[in-house]
Image: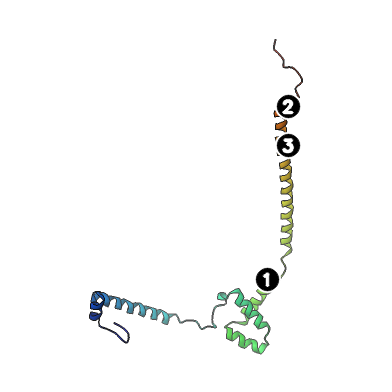
């Protein structure tokens, strides 16, 4: 029904066994969806390859741009930024972020790590003491089961 070898709806209906009105409705829907798609494309033009938002760049792409830009002179930098679709402020922001990521961790983290190590050491020591106390209790029960209560040397009193 469309294209260079278009056939009539009646011929296609006879050949496929589908009613002509169904084929016509499908054709109208297809044209309607194509029209709607073309309207959306006209309303929102596609961005040019170099005009992405800075937030859409991956970390690898940002690092690549920062490294390439660091090798360029001022005259070449402007052309490079235009080609990449970036502003110099964005490049400086990315460079600062990359340098921040390379700094050693702050001292607060090492203090926290030291505190964690101390607490873990205390827990291990207390676990050993608890295990020793449990072993002594088990041993005491076994001794009492074997020998009974020999601590009691006195005879039981009678009330007479």
Q: According to the image, label 2 marks what residue?
A: 147
What crowding class fits label 2: few (fewer than 14 Cα within 10 Å), some (14-19), or many (20 or more)? few
Q: Which is more foreground, mark 2 or mark 3?
A: 2
Q: Which mark is residue 116?
A: none
Q: Which mark is residue 101?
A: 1
What is the C-alpha distance between the residues marked 3 and 1? 54 Å
Above or below, 116 against 47 in this view is above
Rendered image quadrant of residue 107: bottom right
Disc nearer the start of the sequence (3/1): 1
| Residue shown at 66% from the left, 80% from the top | 67
Disc nearer the start of the sequence (2/3): 3
Q: Position of residue 56 (x, y in %)?
A: 55, 75
Contact (CB < 8 A) between labels 2 and 3? Answer: no
Q: Which is more foreground, mark 3 or mark 1?
A: 3
Residue found at the far top of this picture:
160
Q: Is residue 4 left or right of residue 148?
A: left
Above or below, 120 against 11 in this view is above
What crowding class fits label 1: few (fewer than 14 Cα within 10 Å), some (14-19), or many (20 or more)? few
């Amino acid at each position: 029904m469309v294209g260079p070898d278009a056939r009539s709806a009646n011929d296609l209906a006879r050949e496929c066994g589908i009613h002509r009105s169904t084929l016509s409705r499908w054709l109208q829907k297809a044209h309607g969806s194509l029209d709607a798609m073309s309207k959306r494309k006209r309303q929102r033009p596609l961005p040019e390859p170099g005009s992405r938002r800075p937030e859409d760049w991956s970390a690898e792409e940002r690092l690549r741009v920062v490294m390439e830009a660091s090798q360029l002179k001022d005259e070449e930098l402007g052309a490079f930024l235009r080609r990449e679709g970036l502003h110099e402020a964005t490049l400086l922001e990315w460079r600062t972020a990359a340098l921040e990521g390379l700094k050693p961790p702050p001292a607060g983290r090492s203090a926290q790590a030291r505190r964690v190590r101390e607490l873990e050491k205390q827990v291990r020591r207390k676990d050993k003491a608890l295990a020793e106390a449990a072993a002594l209790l088990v041993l005491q029960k076994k001794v009492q089961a074997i020998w009974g209560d020999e601590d009691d040397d006195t005879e039981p009193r009678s009330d007479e």
